[in-house]
Structures are given as C-alpha cells and as structure tokens.
C-alpha cells in the first residue's frame, strides 16, 4: 500500500497525516476546513476534493472525525467514500463512535466491496504528534495485517482486539478507565491544595509509587498551571462517555464511577468549558471545594 487517504484534519488528524507522510506514504487529504488541507499540502500531501475523490485515489482511506453522524456522512453520504469504492479499497475509521453504527457502516461498505477496520486511538495530541498512539483494531485479521504498516506510522502499540466493532468497544473501555484515573488525580490535587501542601511535590511523590499514572504525570501539572488548552476536548470526552453509558445500559453493566464523572463534566460545560481540555475536570471539584488548586 503506497497511497493513503486521510479525511479529518483536526487536533489529532493533522499530526497523524503528517506521520504518514514522514513514513513515505503518498497522502491524499480532505477536510471541511480548507486551510487545514493547505497546511498538509505544504507538507507534501495532495488535496482531495471530497471523500469520494479521496477514496478513488487511495488504497486505504482513513477517517478521523468527531462523532458517529460525521463518520456515517463521510463514509455513506453524498460524495462519500462509498461512491469512490474500487477493488481492494480498505476504509479505516480511527474516530470514536458507536460500535453498533460501526457494524452498520461496515456492512454497507462491504456491499460495494470495501473492507473496513474500526481503529480508534488513545494517546491524545502528544501521542498523535510523536506517532506513539495506542491503536485498538476491530475487523478481519487479514485486513488488519494488510494495514499494519499504515497503522505503524501513527502508533507504537497496535492491537487487533477482535471482529468488527471490538475496536470501538475497547476504546470505550479505555475512556472509562481514563476518566476514573483523571478524577483520582484531580481529587488528590484538590485535597493537597486545600490542606496547604505543595501540590507539585505531591505529584513528584506520587509518581514514584502505586498511584502513578499517565494522567498524574501529564494532566496533573497542567491543572496546577491552570493550563486548560485542549489535547482532547471536554465535549468529545462527553460524547465518548455517552457511548460508554449506552453500551453499559444495553449490557446491564453498572458504571457508577463513569456516570459520576459524566455529571462532573456536565458541570464543567455549564461553566463554559466545553472547548477546554479534559484536565478542566478539576474545575468541577474546585467549585465543590470553594477553592482552586495551585502549585
């Protein structure tokens, strides 16, 4: 596979597409925002006029867009990927969307001879830039192996977790575990700050023991610096939690911790934080404690 199409050039998509270029792939890009396409063309990519155009010119076409309706539109809508279908085309959706919708989209594409993988990612903007994303893949094993070199240009932990939709289910499990870890960090820093302890020293101490986590080392310092710039938006985290809660409801699985954090993020959104990074979760706890964390 030499030509890869990439649709969706947001915080995650742009650096992922750049890493494909660095790995030597010819990359055809498309986005609703023309300036983002121009940036990638400046790096050596080729502009595609529509998802259909991108698919027609690619061997693998990747989508990285915000939500289930966006993926459905890009894949199956007018001038969508399905209209650019050709022999041996593979569609790889790296967004985080509904597992059920993933299976529906894959079935529709299969009718036109297009094979699909669901391959959502974890690692945030930093991982996208460094090419160190964790990629969890659902779909046929032979299609996964065929696409492994493409995925390896964007991530260093690539796991085939099962059939179609299992990549998305694994990503929802990742989001549940991730927000619980984030909540633990926020609570610890609020407690330390309220007690008058140097919260920077608390992070240093905890990072050497059983309480260590990616969120402690990466999001903790941002909370203390009041750095709420998005590596991953609050509103997208809320979308992921809604999907997780819907799946849990279908399976009669209780997720009390995730449900609580979903509500706390509602509070962050009510405070105007919809476009902030997820580390802004600490703001909901600060409101409850009538204080702000500081280093």
Image: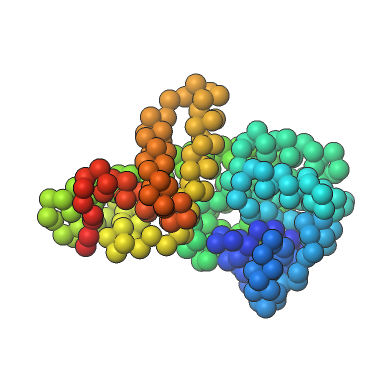
Q: Residue at x 22, y 60 (%)?
A: 294
Position in image of residue 169 (x %, y %): 56, 37
Position in image of residue 246 (x %, y %): 54, 30
Q: Which residue is drawn at 16% across and 50% down?
A: 194
Q: Tell me: 228 left or right of 46.
A: left
Residue furthest toward the left? 196
Q: Is residue 179 visible?
A: no
Q: Is residue 13 visible?
A: yes
Position in image of residue 162 (x %, y %): 62, 37
Residue furthest toward the bottom? 42
Above or below, 222 relative to 114: below
Colour mapping:
rainbow
Q: Residue at x 62, y 36 (%)?
A: 99
Above or below, 165 relative to 211: above
Q: Tell me: 40 left or right of 87.
A: left
Q: Tell me: 182 left or right of 168.
A: left
Residue furthest toward the top? 252
Quadrant for the N terminus, please.
Answer: bottom right
Position in image of residue 274 (x %, y %): 46, 51
| Residue 5 quadrant | bottom right
Q: Which residue is drawn at 20% across and 58% down?
A: 199
Q: Number of callouts in the render? A: 0
Above or below, 192 relative to 141: below
Quadrant for the C terminus, please.
Answer: bottom left
């Amino acid at each position: 596979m030499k030509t890869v199409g990439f649709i969706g050039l947001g915080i995650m998509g742009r650096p992922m597409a750049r890493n494909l270029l660095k790995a030597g792939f010819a990359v055809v890009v498309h986005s609703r925002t023309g300036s983002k396409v121009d940036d990638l063309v400046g790096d050596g990519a080729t502009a595609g006029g529509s998802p259909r155009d991108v698919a027609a010119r690619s061997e693998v076409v990747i989508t990285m867009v915000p939500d289930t309706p966006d993926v459905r539109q890009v894949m199956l809508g007018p001038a969508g990927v399905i209209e650019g279908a050709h022999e041996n085309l593979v569609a790889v959706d790296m967004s985080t969307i509904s597992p059920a919708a993933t299976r529906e989209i894959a079935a529709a594409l299969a009718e036109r001879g297009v094979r699909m993988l669901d391959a959502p990612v974890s690692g945030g903007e930093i991982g996208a830039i460094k090419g160190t994303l964790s990629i969890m893949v659902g779909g046929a094993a032979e299609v996964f192996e065929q696409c492994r070199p493409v995925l390896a240009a964007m991530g260093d932990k690539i796991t085939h977790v099962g059939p179609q939709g299992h990549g998305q289910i694994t990503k929802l499990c990742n989001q549940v575990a991730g927000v619980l870890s984030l909540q633990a960090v926020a609570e610890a820093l609020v407690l330390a700050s309220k007690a008058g302890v140097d919260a920077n020293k608390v992070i240093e101490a905890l990072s050497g023991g059983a309480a260590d986590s990616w969120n402690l080392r990466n999001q903790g310092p941002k909370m203390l610096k009041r750095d709420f710039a998005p590596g991953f938006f609050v509103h997208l985290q809320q979308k992921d939690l809604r999907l997780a809660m819907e799946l849990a409801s279908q399976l009669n699985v209780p997720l009390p911790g995730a449900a609580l954090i979903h509500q706390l993020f509602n509070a962050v959104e009510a405070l105007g934080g919809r476009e902030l990074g997820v580390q802004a979760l600490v703001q909901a706890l600060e409101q409850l404690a009538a204080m702000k964390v500081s280093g």
